[in-house]
Amino acid sequence: MKRITNLFAMAMLSMTTFAQDPIISTKYTADPAPYVHGDTVYLYTTHDEDDAEGFKMFDWLLYTSTDMVNWTEHGAVASLDDFKWYDGKNGAWAEQVIERNGKWYMYCPIHGHGIGVLVSDSPYGPFKDPLGKPLVWQKEHWEDIDPSVWIDDDGQAYMYWGNPHLYCALLNEDMISLKSDAMRLHDTPEHYQEGPWFYKRNGKYYLAFAATCCPEGLGYAMSDNPLGPWKFAGYIMAPTDRTRGNHPGIIDFKGKSYGFGLNYDLKNITIKEHKERRSVGAFPMTYNSDGTIQESPYFKDVKLEQIGTFDPYKARIEAETMAWGFGLKTIKTAKGQIYVTNVNSDEYILIKGVDFGTQKLSKFIANCAATVGGSIELHIDAAKGKKIGSVSVKPTGSETTFKDFAGSISNPKGVHDLYIVFKGAKDKNLMNFDYWKIQ
Ligand code: FUB
């Protein structure tokens, strides 16, 4: 089964090196909530479990990138367990995170139980519940989902949410209490279904949303006022049979605009029937001079350009940094260590646009734990492209005893895609891989 998966992955990759869809391949992710801070995109997502049939969602994940194509996983940064007032086991739906005065606020709907808020001093958490109760819970219905928060230029923060009706409330400056009642908008924009993404850009207010299900597209409305009235302005991505669901996240980053959404393309590599195993995709977004947004083709049909290049000479590079690693999985330990696992022969980590420069290289070091062992080969520009290095990984005594293994590398010079390819016995976890470095 795993072998078949690899073949599908190879086929998929040849299609996706252009389109970069989805952007996360080691887990099923949904409901993208990107947030730009400094030179980094913090991409918070929900998490569809690997065996999900319907929505099976327990925690919220974080990925970061500085170039939009290579993403580092930080694992679950919050979960349902962080809300002591909720004793259910499922329902970690579409969150959004926003920073204010050095504190990070994560607004989390728990399906059917309102919207809670968590706070942290760091984008990476730990996130704590300051209220011990929901921020919003209109118990007469189950419409309290998909919060979206934006702080206006005058400091007033607004939260939009809801399916199928649209609600809005003003937040106090503390970001954890309401300044107004929850107001139901009576001018819900045409085609609105759920997943509002509220923001202001160049003096105009935007409300992007998942447009009427199913299939869902990404629609948007515009207004001159943070509380509307909202006027449907078009599709950012039209509804298409290629994805049943969608959910917007929108940012400006390093001088460009990006939309995020979700699809089923990762699941579709191996499973054709419908299951809620979704994946986050991203695409370049273009605004017209009047502020309207150009409709984007489907994720697979657009090119997500890398911003700049990837520096391979950092003190260490986490193995969970990648543009693609289908078939691989990641584990986050109780101590916060994250490593790549489920490593089978011929699977690989792809890192795009690596700038090797011209310096002389001698060593590639991989930090691994293994009971089986195998080798790691370094190829450029394709998984079977030119081999520039390798390292042999011997058993370390246990799958959690990590050691450095040193191998050789020669500099291919200039910018190349790097494929870190695993080789060894078939159908076994060859090794767990924590980080690598080049010297
Ligand atoms: O992911 C669970 C729910 O599905 C979200 O809250 C909705 O927006 C839809 O994506």
Image (spheres, helix red, strand yellow):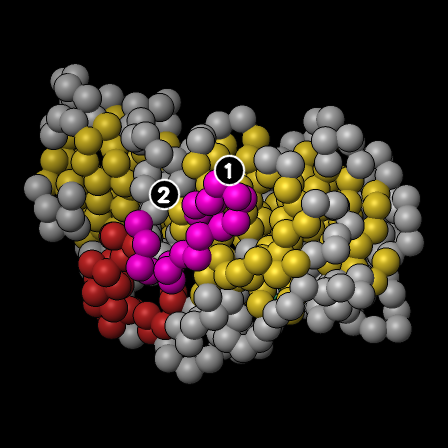
Q: Which quadrant is the C terminus positioned in?
A: top left
Residue at the top extreme?
A: 359
Quick check: 362 above or below 207? above
Q: Which mark is residue 84?
A: none
Quick check: 213 above or below 203? below
Residue wearing tag 1 = 252
Dominant secondary structure (helix, strand or loop) of the stretch shown in magenta: loop
Q: Amino acid at mark 1?
A: Asp
Residue 298 counted in the magenta span: yes
Q: What secondary structure is found at the residue carrying circle 2?
A: loop
- Closest to the observer: 256 or 318? 256
Residue 435, position in %: x, y? 37, 36
Q: What secondary structure is found at the residue carrying circle 1?
A: strand
**Res 248 → quadrant:** bottom right
- Closest to the observer: 439 or 131? 131
Residue 434, position in %: x, y? 39, 40
Residue 281, position in %: x, y? 43, 55
Q: Which residues are magenta?
A: 285-303
Residue 286 counted in the magenta span: yes
- Closest to the observer: 216 or 52? 216
Callout 2: CB less than 8 Å from ligand 1:
no
Mark nearer the N terminus (2 vs 1) = 2
How many residues crowd around disc 2 within 10 Å: few (fewer than 14), some, or many (20 or more)? many
Q: CA distance from mark 2 to mark 1?
A: 15 Å
Q: Amino acid at mark 2?
A: Val
Residue wearing tag 2 = 69
Total labels drawn: 2
Is residue 108 something that shows in the picture? no
Q: Which quadrant is the N terminus positioned in?
A: bottom left
Q: Depth-wise, is mark 2 or mark 1 nearer the camera?
A: 1
Task: Tell me which residue sits at (47%, 44%) in the image.
Answer: 287
